[in-house]
Image (tube, rainbow, N blue to C red):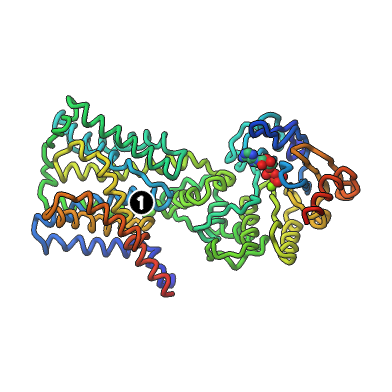
Amino acid sequence: MSESALNLENIVVAFGALKAVDNVSMTVKRGERRAIIGPNGAGKTTLFNAITGVTRSTSGRITFEGLDISRKPAQSRARMGISRTFQITNLFPSLTVEQNMQLALRGTGSRKFSMLGSARLVSEEREQVASALALSRLATREAVEVTELSYGEQRQLEIAMALVSRPRLLLLDEPAAGLSPAERQMVTDIVRSLPKDLTVVLIEHDMELVLKLVDYVTCLNNGQMLAEGSPEEIRANQLVQDVYLGKARANA
Amino acid sequence: MMAMGPLSIWRSPLIFLAILAAIFGVLPLLISQYRMSIANEILIFALLAMSIDVLAGYAGRTSLGHGAIFGTATYVIIYWTANLGGSPWIGCLLAIAAAVLMAAAFALFAMRVSGVYFVLITLALGMIVWGVCLRWSNVTGGENGIRGSGRPDIIADPFVFYYVTLAVVLFFAFVIWRFVHSPFGLSLCGIRDSESRMRSLGYGTTLHMFLAFTITGFFSGIAGVLYAFFNNFVSPSTVELSQSVEGLLMAIVGGVGTIFGAFLGSAAIILLENVVSQYTARWPMVLGFMFIGIMIFAPQGILGALKRQATRKL
Ligand SMILES: Nc1ncnc2c1ncn2[C@@H]1O[C@H](COP(=O)(O)OP(=O)(O)O)[C@@H](O)[C@H]1O
Ligand SMILES: [Mg+2]
């Protein structure tokens, strides 16, 4: 098997005249922790959408574990082991935490087509759900309806749902945005305790958090790759400071 | 044994089925034969309403086409037995197959859309079926319809037919209940809540909607066959829009997403129709007011409101 988990070659995503992602290439190694940073509107979420198939890339090639997935629909990519969370919380609000997890667990298998069997979890599935919930610090909340969860818990459930099917590539879109310092710490702990062989790509604004978590950083600006490097290199990079950190400071 | 909490009554279909079996089972002993035929009709339309409730209450899609799918089955079995002289049992299979195919054809158009687009597409397709039944008169008899050749001897007796209907409808009520509470049924709720999340989790949501729609066509088709045996006559009014509207209203009145509420909704609407039509020909208007009243005072329907009461008391 190839060494790289995810490989992007000259990815372009255009909305009419706007190139939200403009000729981005990058390689993420198996087991790597990668951050994607950049100001709002830089094209980070759009890049995630292109990788997961939510949006088709206008041109370019995406390979996952050596296979070209550029033209595959989102659900096929998910079944291949690509999983994600959403920047704007995207859960099943009228269902319970447990039902959300059931749906998340069965999406990649064949039991989702069972039409007369019980929706209840079988014991093996229950273990998988319990371990994903425990990893996401939601262990005691199974029976609660999603609308009754706090915002922070909903973000934790986002992660638990992305984890439960045991993906090989996990894309986290601003998992800590809008959370209190204590909750951000929890998210940091969650990301840190993820299995070592899982490849993780993380969109995050908070450089402190990024520094603690990742091996490598990609910085986007106006859809284009601005810089790549270790967290320390990115911190010291003049371009990044001007475009991203400067702006972030100005926004604060 | 598992402890039975106060909520588990909503989880177990057997209690409801037993209550329904008891009520509808003793009815014929207490009422006149004419009233028994009304009860028989209630049962048949409850099955149609349950098939609509699968889409409305779980997948969150309001169909105005299931009356046409139901009526397709009625047309096919009556044409087969009366005009072609075929066996009624083979006719049953052909009629149900026709309803399933019709539903599959509807599904091809409707599986990618939701909300008002779904309503409009199912409405338009239903109207096409109605138009064909009206115009293709050398087959369908046009406005005059087709008179059936009567029920097979074994179910000719009204009592026997009533209990056969009861058994079939309760059996499929159980099947539908299992269906919506299966992993596949839960996937329909997921599609209702967030189709984009479902796709990102690995679900081919279009395929799920296609299958769900087609399967509800199967249930509607069974109701359509029972109706053919019950009514012994089919005309374009069997496939017209008001049939779909009535089926949907029954599901709403009973409580969308409750499945068994369909029995209450069907009873309420058919009984009211019988009472009202003694005094006025303006049944559709009454139906309209009732619809508005339900939406204002009990939008979750009768069973939905009861269920809410029961949960709130905990
Ligand atoms: N579906 C869409 N249609 C049109 N424009 C879009 C769409 N999605 C994103 N954009 C635009 O693409 C640019 C990048 O957006 P996004 O990827 O969400 O940025 P980021 O996640 O880095 O904040 C923005 O200008 C945004 O308005
Ligand atoms: Mg974003």
Q: Residue A49: in sight, yes or no?
A: no
A104 left or right of A32? Answer: left
Towards the viewer: B154 or B148: B148
Locate residue B221, reporting x and y percent.
28, 41
Give the quadrant of residue A6.
top right
Residue B220's place in the image compared with B76, above or below, is below
The amino acid sitting under disc 1 is Asp
Number of numbered discs visible in the structure rendering: 1
Name the quadrant of the C terminus of chain A.
Answer: bottom right
Q: Residue at x 26, y 65 (%)?
A: B19
Give the quadrant of residue B216.
top left
Q: Residue at x 29, y 39 (%)?
A: B69
Name the quadrant of the N terminus of chain A.
Answer: top right
Q: Residue B188: in sight, yes or no?
A: yes
Residue A180's place in the image compared with B52, above or below, is below
Which residue has dot 1 on it? Answer: B53
Q: Chain of mark 1?
A: B
